[in-house]
Image: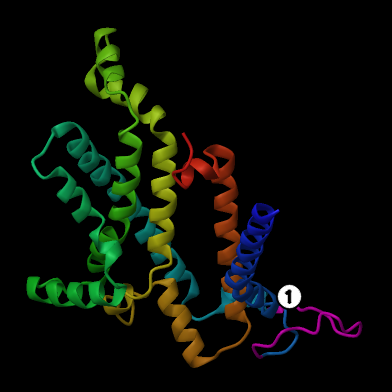
Amino acid sequence: MTERIAIGFCILCILLASAFLLAPLAVIVATSFSPTPVFDLPPLFDPGSALSLRWYGRIGNLDGFWPALLLTLQVAALSTAISLVLGTMAAIGIIRGKLPGGEIFGALLVSPLMLPGLVIGIALLQFFRMAGLTAAYPALLLAHLIITLPYVARTMLAGLTRFDFTLIEAARMLGCSFPAAIMKVMVPALAPSFFTASFFAFLASFDNYPISIFLTDARTKTLPIKMLQYIEEAPDPTLAALSSLILAATLALLLIGDRLVGLNRMAGTGD
């Protein structure tokens, strides 16, 4: 009886914690249907009220929205792709190279996750100024590499520890060249790890604000920075609609990942 009460209490705590975490998102989605031009919850239980979709139609008309969106997607895609190459090579070097202090090097790869984003942003701003790098785009790309590389390196380290490298040697004995063996054996076997690393790295780059704010200029602004500007200049439910679309896109990616890989494997709890 006591065990059942404890399990029930744990389930209740999980439900309350989930509700606490999801409540702000539900408020944002509800606000995006507001019939008034203010951040106001629509009267859902009023029969005479009508939900409005006009804020979704205004997203494309926001000043500088499309350039900011394209810049954000481009930087996120490039940083994720480069991080996949560098992170995978670093993980292979740690797993197979038997480097002295390999565990320390692996910890250094994920160290940016342990620091506040504002601290990293200020440090990168000072470093780039000392190095003479004043262009916003390359500075953003390098900074986002620092953001995305830890996710890729950590995920690939976990995936490579379960990979049997003798399969590559067997493929070479059967006539495959080394690059062909990598493409035909390692890449398919590590496809779930590649997808998981890409997923988290892309989202980390796309949603980054505390580092990007120090490295943008008047003509080069990512979408999170533009959204902050919209809040300061003309706040209305259009921002809630844009946030709802970003949330919907994230959920869609999660569903795709669940179908292709499985949430358990993406979370690192599956085989």
| Residue 180, quarter of the rendered image | top left
Measured as percent of width and height from the top left, residue 213 is found at 32, 78
User: Which residues fall within the magenta stretch?
Assistant: 38-54
Residue at left offset 64%, top offset 69%: 16
Q: Where is residue 184 in the image (x, y as percent from the top left)?
A: 36, 22
> Residue at point 52% right, 38% down?
261
Outermost residue, top side: 174
Horizontal arrangement in the rendering, residue 266 relative to residue 251 (left or right): left
- Which type of secondary structure does the marked residue at label 1 adopt? loop
Q: From the viewer's perspective, is 130 left or right of 248?
A: left
Q: Reply yes or no: does residue 42 show up in magenta.
A: yes
Question: Magenta segment: does it hold 85?
Answer: no
Residue ID for mark 1: 53
The residue under label 1 is which amino acid type?
A: Leu
Name the residue nearer the viewer: 85 or 258: 258
- Residue occupying image coordinates x 42% and y 63%: 206
| Mark 1 crowdedness (10 Å alpha carbons): few <14, some 14-19, many ≥20 | some
Horizontal relation, residue 158 to residue 49: left or right: left
- Residue 181, picture quadrant: top left
Task: Give the image location of residue 219, x and y in percent.
Answer: 33, 78
Q: Where is residue 105 in the image (x, y as percent from the top left)?
A: 16, 49
The residue at the point 15 percent across, 43 percent down is: 102
